[in-house]
Amino acid sequence: MVQFARSPITAVLGPTNTGKTHLAVERMCGHSSGMMGFPLRLLAREVYDRVVVIKGRDQVALITGEEKIAPPNARYVLCTAESMPVDGDYAFVALDEAQLAADPERGHIFTDRLLRARGREETMILGSASISRLVRRLVPEAEIIGRPRFSTLSYAGAKKLSRLPRRSAVVAFSAEEVYAVAEMLRRFRGGAAVVMGALSPSTRNAQVQMFLNGDVDYLVATDAIGMGLNLDVAHVAFASLHKFDGHRTRRLTVAEMAQIAGRAGRHHRDGTFGSLGGDDSGATFTPEEIEAIEGHRFPPLDFLYWRDGTPRCDSIDLLIADLEEKPDRPELRAAPQAIDLAVLRKLAADPLVVERGQRQVARLWAACGLPDFQKLGADHHARMVSRIWRFLSEGDGHIPRDWFASHVARLDSIQGDIATLSGRIAAARTWSYIAHRPDWLAFPAEMAERTRALEEKLSDALHAALRQRFVDRRTSVLLRDIGQNASALPVDVQPDGQVAVDGESIGRLDGFRFSVDPDARAQDRKMLLAAAERHLGRILRVKADELLKAPDTEFTLRDLPGEAPGIAWGDHVVATLLAGPSLLAPAIRLDRALMELGQDQQKQIVTRLSAWADAQKQRHLLPLVKMAQSAADPAVPPVVRAVFAQLGEQGGLVARTDLDSALAHLDKDQRHLLRRAGIDIGVLDIYHPGLLKPGAARWRSALLAARLAKPCLPLPLPGLTLLPAGERTDQMGARIAGFRGFGPQMLRVDMAERMARAAHEAIAKGEAFTALSPQIVSLGLGEPAFLQLMRDAGFRAVDPAAEGAANWAFRGRQKARPRPAPRQQRATPAPAAPAAPATHGAFAGLADLLGRNG
């Protein structure tokens, strides 16, 4: 971190309206070449236009993340701090608003430029006097020069909106609040221009021009105007003194208040500042704050945020380690994790990214530097960067032209309201940034021109919409008091789903469903909900796109006991299963929260969920699917189709007594068709063993619940073969899962059939078969349940005291068959004596039964 100065360094520090930027521009134009870095692309564009007038368009370049004007012979470069090439060779270099090095989000960028950006002949550091002590320690060779303010800045008190003086700027801290104030000014004072940092340069310039031309006398802006934008403003009114800083809603610092208030007054014309509304509006300055602002006395900064500006790219782990390295100077503090590092850490968990990235670490890090213009968070942004990186790391290393063009084309529409157009411009900035990376596209110049034209088109539409809404068009909404009207307050969505209005929680967003805080005051409930819904609309649409692109692994069957069956995406239910044409074809009804989406998106989501459900049925219920196909196959005999149909509609598990009449009409070949389909015709039940698996049981339970419009039932734990019989609901759920009740216990149907066969085998050998037999004991089947099993399986008790005799005899099925077997094969009642050999009497009937049942 030792710096080697190559030139004289001057730090020009002081309050606003001291001519610092003007001085730096003059100094740069006096050198053979120069570069200046600014905090906003709007400010860079403003200074670019000034230098073009002095030096000519072919001598001046403008470089920002999403805009690049670079003539071949350009000698003067105006750029954002992030775009400053610190290794460039320029006679003059300047960094504006250097005190932003203390900003948690972008501070490490300004600190890096403060320490490393140097001109060959002269270097200038511009900023607030609050950074002077740190400049003296970090850049000891710098000469610090203070400059006084050209004009006086004084406090003018609180003013109602209807009494604001002309040429005033009202400063708010969210888009919703800006729009609310602008609508009130339209109602009370005829209109207002709107300036926000998220606007494109052309939209911002068009809005400012209305103000400069006198078309409107008022300007409503975010705190972006505090970053050096030169506006002819006489008075600055604060709509609020609180802002959300990305983590919490807090009161502005005195330095932040002064930076914004200092926009009032220009050159030698004095300016004033104050608050909007009455003394109880929440925007009241304290006497200490007023004195500090008027006297330009602010606490010195204690530290600047730092991150290694030249991390090693030998490996991903080494890159992350360098980016997380702590500074070795007490004046510096490690920067909080920025969005680029957050994305890198997420991608580092992807094996494919790691495998490719180890060979191209610098290129991977460049991809992670794609700004999150849409402010949708690290998770969503990481998906976007991952897609870009996959293109950059394979083939010719370029993003496919058709893929890029298709995404740009989707934004090519000027329909929609202000929020929609602003969202499209933010998205267009993403593609513009990509187009200005010369090594990311095969035809960067063509795509850069296309994105530039798109942004201009959208900007013109946005300017027209802003003008129509806040200048030309009368609105039916009358907002009389910004301090009391909740629809004018900022709405923020926290990462955990909490939705807050001006820092106060009003509910939460779970998946697509927004629920209002029940503690919200009744008089504010509707307005707060309306503000949240306007803000959440864009996020819901983005979530819908993510759902459509989500892999099958992100969806699960929702089958909680007592609830309707449904489909969940992650932890959130997105659809409910209802009765459809058949058991295997349930209807899918989207959750009510998704009804806020457009019809096209709703249809696409239903199609996506249906495809997933079909894949799950093929995976877990393939035997049931084949039964349904066989039931509709003309090549299958009608009597067999009837059996398949009954089995299919009941989930592939039917009690033998319910199908006795149908089975009686089947001949041997027709029974063979059932055996080939994998169906077991047991003494107690008819079923397919594959449908007894846990996954199949869950799906059968859910489909049957949907078919009957009932809630899902609790199912036994996977792997159990025996369980005590509990409540009625438990018994029903156990039956669906493949269990049969025997007195106080329930046994899985395949095990029950196995025990019945074991009984036949023991009796055939003349062995006793009791509740103490090894098979029964190993199962844990109690004597009452055992006795019920034997009776249900068609056995009757004989004299248990006979020495060496079996204590059970098979008595056959109680319902006579329509087609009796030949006399020599029919079962006859067994005497109360030792069982006959297996080829005679009751066991001949057993052999016949087993032979015909397969």
Image: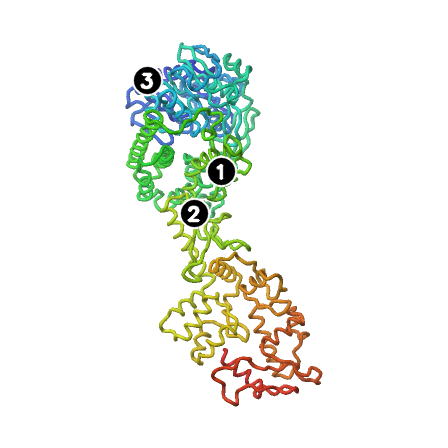
40 or 144, nearer to the observer: 40
The x and y percentages for residue 258 are: 48, 18
- Dot 2 or dot 3, earlier in sequence: 3
| Label 2 vs label 1, nearer the camera | 2
- Say few, some or many: other residues with alpha carbon within 10 Å of mark 3 (under 14 / 14 to 19 / 20 or more): few
32 or 258, nearer to the observer: 258
- Dot 3 or dot 1, earlier in sequence: 3
Q: Which of the 4 image quarters holds residue 845?
A: bottom right
Of all residues shown, which one is farthest toward the bottom?
A: 824
Q: What is the secondary structure assignment of the residue under circle 1?
A: helix
722 or 24, nearer to the observer: 722
The x and y percentages for residue 495 are: 51, 38
Number of the label disc, if any, that sits on residue 547: 2
Residue linked to disc 3: 214
Which amino acid does the dot numbered 3 rest on? Gly
- Dot 2 or dot 1, earlier in sequence: 1
Which amino acid does the dot numbered 1 rest on? Ala
| Label 2 vs label 3, nearer the camera | 3
Residue linked to disc 1: 342
The x and y percentages for residue 793 are: 58, 76
Name above or below for residue 566 compared with residue 495: below
- The number of numbered badges drawn on the structure is 3
As measured in the structure, the alpha-carbon distance from the residue carrying label 2 to the one carrying label 3 is 48 Å
As measured in the structure, the alpha-carbon distance from the residue carrying label 3 to the one carrying label 1 is 46 Å
Proximity of marks 3 and 1: CB atoms separated by less than 8 Å: no
- Say few, some or many: other residues with alpha carbon within 10 Å of mark 2 (under 14 / 14 to 19 / 20 or more): some
Q: What is the secondary structure assignment of the residue under circle 3?
A: loop
Q: What is the secondary structure assignment of the residue under circle 2?
A: helix
Which amino acid does the dot numbered 2 rest on? Leu
